[in-house]
Image (spheres, grey):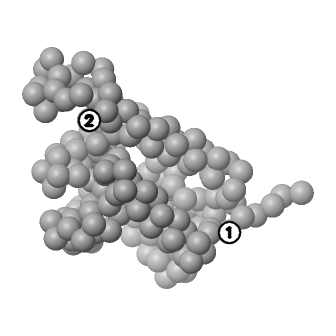
Amino acid sequence: MNIIYEPWPWYVAGPLIALVMFLLLFAGKKFGMSSNLRTMCAAGGAGKVADFFKFNWKEERWNLLVVIGAVIGGFIASQFMSNNKVDINPKVSKQLSDDYQIDSSGKAYLPPELFSTEQLSNPSMLGVLLVGGLLVGFGARYAGGCTSGHAISGLSNLQLPSLLAVIGFFVGGLVMIHAIFPIIF
């Protein structure tokens, strides 16, 4: 028997996120995925190379559980709690097929035309991934945190810089998908 799970409704997931944020705020902790990378680099000895990584990473090792939980939770959700199909607007699916030759839209969360391991052998795709990764890393550091840190933790703490960062993330995403992506692909 194949069981298809639906996403949790907003009235369940939203309060759970709020509860986690309240517990982190109560414990004096901040949430964000980019801080996990900093903790991993510091634990690996990156403090010998850059002052940015010179801090007591052992106080932040709880952050590493967030990464482990995200990886395990993502695996469980994708393998056992999802039909791995996303319903998108038929007009968007047609546009993706006509303009970008992405014919798997609506059939998979990650289109293999962009995210398959075969794409790593394509030098231009590898270049896009490397440049994109550097830009995302630079942007997260320049903005003082990543999208999850600002959008979930920063906004729940009513921080104006986080609101500005989230607005910037959305504007950057719109520019990317409507102006830069068509040029690259």
Give whichever of 171, 183 is nearer the camera: 171
Check the image and name the residue furthest to the left: 51
Q: Earlier in the sequence, mark 2 or mark 1?
A: 1
- Identify the residue at horizontal 48%, vertical 64% (top origin): 19
Q: Residues within 10 Å of mark 2 (few under 14, many from 20)?
A: many
Identify the mark at residue 6; answer none if there is no mark: 1
The N terminus - image quarter: bottom right
Q: Is residue 178 left or right of residue 5?
A: left
Label 2 vs label 1: CA separation?
34 Å
The type of residue carrying mark 2 is: Arg
Residue farthest along the front direction in this orientation: 26
Mark 1: give few (<14), some (14-19) or many (20+) Cα within 10 Å: few
Q: Quadrant of residue 38?
A: top left
Q: Nearer the viewer, mark 2 or mark 1?
A: 2
Image quadrant holding the C terminus, namely: bottom left
Q: Classify 73 as above or below 43.
A: below
Q: Residue furthest right?
A: 1
Identity of the residue drawn at 45% across and 43% down: 66
Residues 165 and 128: in front is 165
Q: Secondary structure at mark 2?
A: helix
Q: Is residue 179 visible?
A: no
Q: Amino acid at mark 1?
A: Glu
Q: Nearer the viewer, residue 141 or 131?
A: 141
**Left or right placement of residue 19 versus residue 79 in this view:** left
- Mark 2, residue position: 38
Image check: 184 left or right of 99? left
Residue under the image location 32 percent in, 60 percent down: 153
